[in-house]
Image: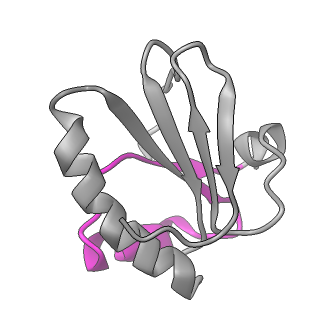
Amino acid sequence: MDGQEIILSRKTSFLTFFLTTCSHCQVESASLNKVFHKYHESKELQILAVAPRMDSRENLMKFIDEYQITYPILHDQENQVIKLYGVIAVPHNIFIDREGKVKRVITVRLIW
């Protein structure tokens, strides 16, 4: 959330689009921490959460604190990433391979 550029390449990536007020997203986000901790050190999987501009920075910070989120969250203030991937509802999850190709889109809550 601090304005860093994030490059999705050379590793499998998982993008999760969410809203802090979405109950399904809350459950999914909490369980995604386990996956992040399992794969973060090995660098086999890059996890990135994307929140739309309608979520305030204040709400995002509360969400991160409440659910103890340790994976990176992008606050898509211009909704550019959301538009790029055609997200129209949340939760919306995308698996991207090492070549940058979308391999799977899942539009239901995932429990890890």
**Count of marks, rendered view:** 0
Q: Which of the two residues, 33 or 76, is positioned nearer the viewer here?
A: 33
- Rendered location of residue 106, percent (x, y): 66, 57
Considering the image in quadrants, where does the C terminus appear? bottom left
Q: Which of the two residues, 24 or 70, is positioned nearer the viewer here?
A: 24
Q: Which of the two residues, 95 or 5, is positioned nearer the viewer here?
A: 95
Q: Is residue 36 above or below residue 52?
A: above
Residue shown at the point (54%, 87%) measured from the top left: 23
* Residue 24 visible in the snapshot: yes
In the image, the segment drawn in magenta is 51-77
Task: Identify the colour scheme used.
Answer: one colour
Q: Is residue 110 above or below residue 3?
A: below
Side (left or right) of 5 relative to 69? right
Q: Quadrant of residue 67?
A: bottom left
* Residue 70 visible in the snapshot: no
- Rendered location of residue 63, percent (x, y): 39, 75
- Rendered location of residue 57, percent (x, y): 51, 64
Q: Residue 12: within the magenta?
A: no
Side (left or right) of 35 relative to 19? left
Residue shown at the point (32%, 69%) measured from the top left: 31
